[in-house]
Amino acid sequence: MNKTVTIDLARAALADVTTDASVPAGASPQTPVHPQSLLDLPPGEARQSLLTVHSILGIKLPPTRLAIYEAGGGSTSFLPLDVLRRAHVTVVDIDEDQIRNNDYAHETILGDVQTYRFAPGSFDLVICYNVIEHLADVEAALSGFCESLKQGGLILIGAPNPKSLSGVVTKYSPHWFHVWFYRYVRGDKNAGQPGQAPFPTFFHPLVTLSNLEAFASAHGLQVIYRKEYESPRYPEMRARKPAFAALLDAVAVVMNLLLPGKADVRHGDYHVILRKR
């Protein structure tokens, strides 16, 4: 199935998901439909793209029992619940608090995703979500992910866009500023505490989307979904700090006018799904 057909099918599935705001056919009103990580996203491009990701996973993953590796998964999963319910999930995370807080994995391993290795062909899906920006050696981590995949297996990556406004600020500002932003702009009073975001960032060159795609092509991986989207921080700020958000939106408009092409500096995050040929 080529990329265009995959995305078209995902859009059709997305329409089915979004037209039913409550529960799927045959499910009780108490049956959770989406993971909390999706429900916590404000309405906007981030939530829409994650729903599309869920739809593509439903199309491309085999309908049998699944083996899933969450690299740096910690305490939160971004996978659709119907996939999690039929999967054996293995989480590797370097943070003891994240491992301790995990309540969905069947196996948790305290380890470094850059160096930890599984037997070749172990998994149907590897997910690395909001993690690669924190790694000093992304190439080593990605090589391990690819090796651990079965033929036709998928890698799902969610990451910040280093070329966006938020990406540039995050890359070149000190960690204490990130903690301040989470606490006083986002309203997360636990930010910076053990096991709590934000975590220190490295922004290895492979976090840049064009470099990541080049790596994928050179290592036998096909890009079947790619989406840059407005960071969920923007709708959050519009609701919590409207004056500050209006200022940022104005800055973004000016920057977009000065940049070549149709880039939008508010596209602070991306989703990529790679398939092992």
Image (cartoon, helix red, strand yellow):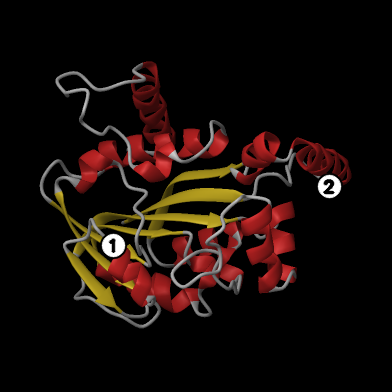
Q: Identify the residue at horizontal 50%, vertical 75% (top origin).
A: 135
Q: Identify the residue at horizontal 36%, vertical 42% (top origin).
A: 36
Q: Which mark is residue 207?
A: none
Amino acid type, mark 1: Asn
Q: Where, quadrant-wise, is the N terminus in this rendering?
A: top left
Q: Identify the residue at horizontal 62%, vertical 58% (top origin).
A: 183
Q: Identify the residue at horizontal 20%, vertical 31% (top origin).
A: 31
Q: Which residue is mark 1?
A: 102
Circle 2: is it few (<14), some (14-19), or many (20+) Cα within 10 Å? few
Front position among marks 1 and 2: 1
Compared with 91, 232 (above or below) is above
Would residue 44 be found to the left or right of residue 177 on screen? left
Task: Please state which of residues 143 and 214 is positioned toward the viewer in this rendering.
Answer: 143
Would residue 85 be found to the left or right of residue 45 on screen? left
Q: Which residue is mark 2?
A: 259
Amino acid type, mark 2: Leu
Would residue 94 be found to the left or right of residue 255 on screen? left
How far from the left and from the top, in percent, is residue 266? 70, 44
Q: How many marks?
A: 2
Q: CA distance from mark 1 to mark 2?
A: 42 Å
Contact (CB < 8 A) between labels 1 and 2? no
How far from the left and from the top, in percent, is residue 177? 71, 67
Would residue 29 be found to the left or right of residue 39 on screen? left
Circle 1: is it few (<14), some (14-19), or many (20+) Cα within 10 Å? some
Task: Please state which of residues 267 and 185 is positioned toward the viewer in this rendering.
Answer: 185
